[in-house]
Amino acid sequence: MIDKNRRSLVLAAGGALAAGTMGSAGAWAQAAGGGAERKLGYAVVGLGSYGLGMIIPQFKNCKNSRLVGLVSGDPAKAKRVAAEYGVPEKNIYNYQNYDSIRDNPDIDIVYVCLPVSMHAEYTIRAAKAGKHVMCEKPMAVSSAECEAMIAACRQAGKKLMIGYRCHFEPTNLEAIRRARAGEIGKLRYFRSEHGFNFGNPDAWRLKKAMSGGGSLMDMGIYALNASRYMTGEEPVAVYAVESTDKKDPRFREVEDRIAFELEFPSGVIGSCMSMYSAAQNHILLMGDKGRIELEPATAYHGNKLWVGNGHGDDKNEVTPPPGPGATQWAGQLDHLSQCVLQNREPIVGGEEGLRDIRIIEAIYRSAREKRRIALGPDARMV
Amino acid sequence: MIDKNRRSLVLAAGGALAAGTMGSAGAWAQAAGGGAERKLGYAVVGLGSYGLGMIIPQFKNCKNSRLVGLVSGDPAKAKRVAAEYGVPEKNIYNYQNYDSIRDNPDIDIVYVCLPVSMHAEYTIRAAKAGKHVMCEKPMAVSSAECEAMIAACRQAGKKLMIGYRCHFEPTNLEAIRRARAGEIGKLRYFRSEHGFNFGNPDAWRLKKAMSGGGSLMDMGIYALNASRYMTGEEPVAVYAVESTDKKDPRFREVEDRIAFELEFPSGVIGSCMSMYSAAQNHILLMGDKGRIELEPATAYHGNKLWVGNGHGDDKNEVTPPPGPGATQWAGQLDHLSQCVLQNREPIVGGEEGLRDIRIIEAIYRSAREKRRIALGPDARMV
């Protein structure tokens, strides 16, 4: 079997990597004797708008990843999608026979694109079936679930990565690079607003049992995660204010707006806003010598980056160099494939997802109790 | 004496206004039998950068105000300025003989352009000398001082106005008008950052005894005041985080950065940032149907206004109609003159300044005690 042979080669390459003799996918591919890039097989779990609309079309842009399987509760839809993307019918699964993916050597990695409340179960079942896991963010509805997911993957000896696509998005990467290079001086202030005006009041994201929360879980997490990757620091305290019109039919179960202030060890203040009733997608880094601004900051397409002196009258738009993949999703998908191939840990692994969820839990608690919550080094409330 | 006659006319007009028969300066001028605009006489107290650089040159743009007196501790400087602006030498005072302005009928109004710690004394002495007062913002170093200033002016039967120039600035006025007209739907979120990178470490603004505080007193007050005039609401609670590098020679006595979250009764969240180590001058209003953005928002010149759908890709710059004065300062100066002439209360009187100082005191306390502070209807901490 081709796949078995490939896996042997991967193991051999992994050993070589561990010994420190090689350092890149290209080097590995050479060592593997081919020169051609190897592609690991992904099964996408969940054919909702994100999985079907955003992830599945991206495999054509990947170097190390290909779509080989589908998991769906809708057999007709799965069949249609399989036909469109050349997935063999034998690689279509449903939620009942999902565990039998263990017997399918085509599938190396499972991508969990389900409502948040299902992330833990489908990640853990994948790990138990011997598959690596890419899980969409937010990682899960609670930190306890995140911990269980990490434990399951560790126990199975499988990689776990969270779908933080912005870590592979050129505009964000260029902003990080410039901030780290000291281009705006000493960082003083981080701000990010993320939100949109939610339309459909019946969407699963507005059902707390499925989403785990409102705008914070869905949009605020972009601001929170960006506050961490842009500053390169971890927050030591948080304070949050929630504002939700409970008479609005969209917000019977989950929050609309939540503002949160983050304190970072260097003294940087992070001021974030998450909204389901207004549209904004913005990141600002203020240094004592200037500023970096992104708007839209974390959109699927068309993100823009400006660098200036902070007075607003000299903003220069910057075109970032290409990112690690042809698109942010290709970069993300291939990163996990390369981590598997080279036995490296993903840059946004389970611990990254857990950390955000712990901070989100602190934000919710702060808003509920109307008080500042201190965070320990592992982002647990102290 | 011309001035005595004028004052009689003013009183007559004031009586007519109180009876509700007239409502505008133009109407008053007609009633006063002239048709020509009357000009009240201002004495500027303090020839520092703001008084000398910004206020004094503005009288040439005024319809109802003229510069007639100077109060300074530097006789040579005062003489030079007086000569340049046509102020008679007899109308030059110093801080010792300041109270004798009571005997000078040329002076109707005193404009206090001194370090904040001197605002209360020079306002109260002006009121006792029978003069109306324009006092620069922040109104004073404490709410107790503000209350004493209000009481002194009330007791003397004199007007008190605080130098909130942005209430006369076309860009801000147009933003308020559009927000109130519902152009961006229901207001969801207000944000403002104000700051600059402070240069001179020896400036009086960095001496707590003279300034009353750091960036919040000087710059954050713009964000705070804007949160109130833009929303048309009064905050019911505040939470603040301060971040100051005490090893920075500029910040031995006063704060550098302070972020504060304001809760408004309608559910609007106000997120503000004040800084002495980074340059930013920005106001954003997010509604559920769009946004209004100002940048720079409260600068002396060149403020800009955009209206858009909130996605950042359709921002349309808007040219506001002219404001009430030829410049924001002319509008401000003439407003107090007109209030005196028509016996009206200024739109930004002592109570407005007091309210900001009460909230500022709550912000400082919140930052110090790391807790949310609730505010009563009069902005007192509860």
Image (spheres, coloured by chain):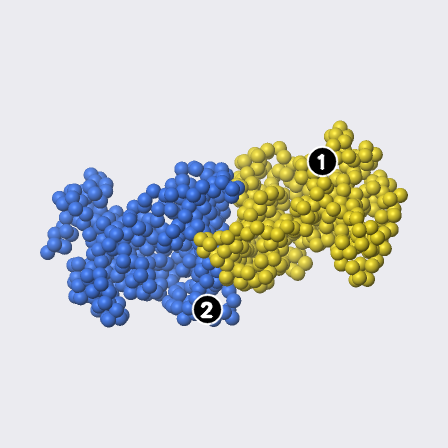
Chain colours: A blue, B yellow
Q: Quadrant of residue B233?
A: bottom right
Q: Is residue A105 visible?
A: yes
Mark 2 in CB contact with mark 1 (< 8 angstroms): no
Which three-letter amino acid code belongs to the residue tagged 1?
Leu
Residue A371 at what x, y percent from top left? Answer: 53, 57
Give the residue furthest to the left.
A1
**Left or right of A213 on screen, residue B45:** right
Most foreground residue, B176 or A170:
B176
Residue B135 at what x, y percent from top left? Answer: 72, 45
The residue shown at (50%, 69%) is A248
**Left or right of B34 on screen, residue A233:** left
The residue shown at (45%, 56%) is B311
**Left or right of B217 on screen, residue B131:** right
The CA distance from mark 2 to mark 1 is: 57 Å
Chain containing the residue with disc 1 = B
Q: Quadrant of residue A20?
A: top left
Q: Which residue is mark 2?
A: A250
**Secondary element at tag 1:** loop
Q: Which mark is residue B47?
A: 1
